[in-house]
Amino acid sequence: MKNNRFIIPFAILGLSLIVSTFIFSSTWRKIKSENQTITVTGSAKKVIVSDLGVLRGTLSVEASTALEAYRLLQAQKPVLIEYFKSKGFSGDKVNLQTISSFPNYYFNSQGQSTGIRSYNASQLIDISSSDVQLIKTMSIEISSLVERGVNFQVNPPEYYYTKIGDIKIKIQAEAAKDAMIRGKRIAEATGRELGALKLPEWGFFKSLLKIPI
């Protein structure tokens, strides 16, 4: 009987702890549920067409003297300019860079310079146009000028889209809408409602842009 008199107080105490634990656990779950957030990433893709093409190349010659190299370069230039004009590019639309010249040396078996062999003269030239298809066509056929004595080494054409700022807001709106739809589906599946939506930075959308020609 002496031992049994402790059973009821301890049972009551144990039950109290269980109830207290249940209340604390329920309250903690409620607080956690109220403060729960989800991160949903929205995406948007838009195929855009380049509206600016740039064609760059180098006109170059080699001669025994620097003066002769310069004269040869100047002799080839009118042929190239005339070609550009035939494609609709007037003289002021052709961007001519500074002429550069450098010597080519002879070397002995020890790798030491033994004198000047020849001189190179070159000039960078570029044009740009909103007709990107024309730029592409010219990049292919301009090498044929070698048949007319013109040594023009053309670079791969470059294509750009100049109105990227105009579609920035539209892309952001579409991505935000996509994120809202995804978030709503997740919330509905768990019996909750969406709160405020936070937009990501523009750089995220920029990486999704495709710029074909």
Image: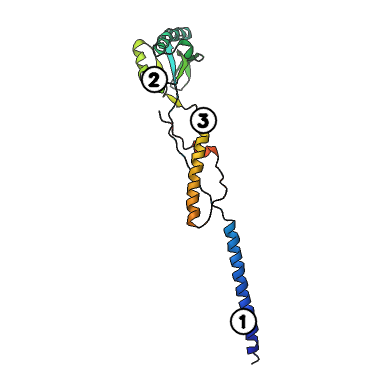
Q: CA distance from mark 1 to mark 3?
A: 73 Å
Residue 139 figure quarter: top left
Relative to 163, residue 36 above or below: below
Q: CA distance from mark 3 to mark 2?
A: 25 Å
Of the residues shown, which amino acid type is indicated by label 2? Leu
| SS at badge 2 | helix
Residue 4 figure quarter: bottom right
Q: Nearer the viewer, residue 186 or 205?
A: 186
Of the residues shown, which amino acid type is indicated by label 1? Ala
Q: Residue at x 61, y 73 (%)?
A: 19
Front tag of 2 and 1? 1
Query: Which residue was labeled with disc 2?
Result: 134
Relative to 39, residue 213 above or below: above
Q: Which mark is residue 72?
A: none
Mark 2 crowd level (few <14, some 14–19, many ≥20, 10 Å Cα): few
Q: Nearer the viewer, residue 128 or 198?
A: 198
Relative to 79, residue 196 above or below: below
Q: Residue at x 53, y 35 (%)?
A: 169
Q: Position of residue 211 (x, y in %)?
A: 43, 31
Q: Which mark is residue 166?
A: 3
Which numbered disc flags the more N-terminal residue, 2 or 1? 1
